[in-house]
Image (cartoon, rainbow, N blue to C red):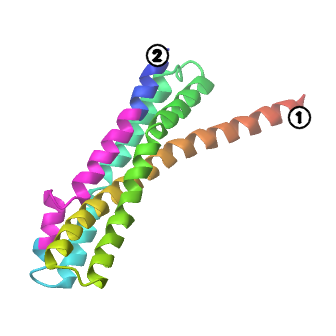
Amino acid sequence: MLIWVTIIAGLLVGIIIGKATEYYTSHDFKPTQGIVAQGQSGPATVIIQGLAVGMQSTPIPVITIAIGITIAYYFSGGAENTLMGLYGVGLAAVAMLSTLGITLAADAYGPIADNAGGNAEMAGLEPEVRQRTDELDAVGNTTAATGKGFAIGSAALTALALLAAYLEEIRFSLMHLRG
């Protein structure tokens, strides 16, 4: 049993999901630049391109979570003992959630930057101020998306561990009812 591998797996799942989300939502990378380029021909193509990029962005987190669950299950002894495997998945979820403080702080940055831009516009400040707040808003949108992707990934790992614990409790209760 290599319990430490399950913890590393949970941390890596969180990092990979965060990086994938950043790639698909940041204005510095090709997917969002492609959506912007579609804006030249009208709103319908922007919507279609946005949906396409959204669909392209899902396999990386899904596959990463599946691999993380598999690694956590087997490296914690799940092949010999199901409960140990489920314990490993729970540890991976906790490891992924261990960076939650940083993730929540980054997620909270998005609305703050957006409000700063709105305040600058309503106050009638110089265009230079509005340009700076727009750049901050773009970064804020990316960090908000990263926080959401991270939350969904950790919810998947945690939900699997909770479901397994619930099923085990039912099995244990039925075993005692039968005598």
Disc 2 from disc 1: Cα separation = 35 Å
Q: In this view, does 128 lie to the left or right of 72?
A: left
Q: Is residue 88 left or right of residue 30?
A: right
Q: Is residue 132 left or right of residue 158?
A: left
Label 1 residue SS: helix
Does the magenta segment cover residue 1? Answer: no
Per the image, the residue denoted by label 1 is: 177
Res. 139 image quadrant: bottom left
Residue in the picture at 36% in, 72% down: 115
Q: Nearer the viewer, residue 121 or 45?
A: 121
Q: How crowded is mark 1: few (under 14 residues within 10 Å), some or many (20 or more)?
A: few
Q: Which amino acid does label 2 sit on?
A: Leu
User: Which mark is first along the chain, 1 or 2?
Assistant: 2
**Residue 107: percent from the left, percent from the top?**
39, 56
Residue in the picture at 30% in, 63% down: 141
**Residue 55: percent from the left, percent from the top?**
29, 62
Res. 56 image quadrant: bottom left
Does the magenta segment cover residue 29? Answer: yes
Q: What residue type is labelled 1?
A: Leu
Quadrant housing the C terminus: top right
Q: Nearer the viewer, residue 112 or 126?
A: 126
Per the image, the residue denoted by label 2 is: 2
Residue in the picture at 24% in, 65% down: 138
Residue 149 seen in the figure? no
Q: Which of 110 and 55 is in front in this view?
A: 110
Q: Which stretch is magenta?
A: 11-36
Res. 27 image quadrant: bottom left
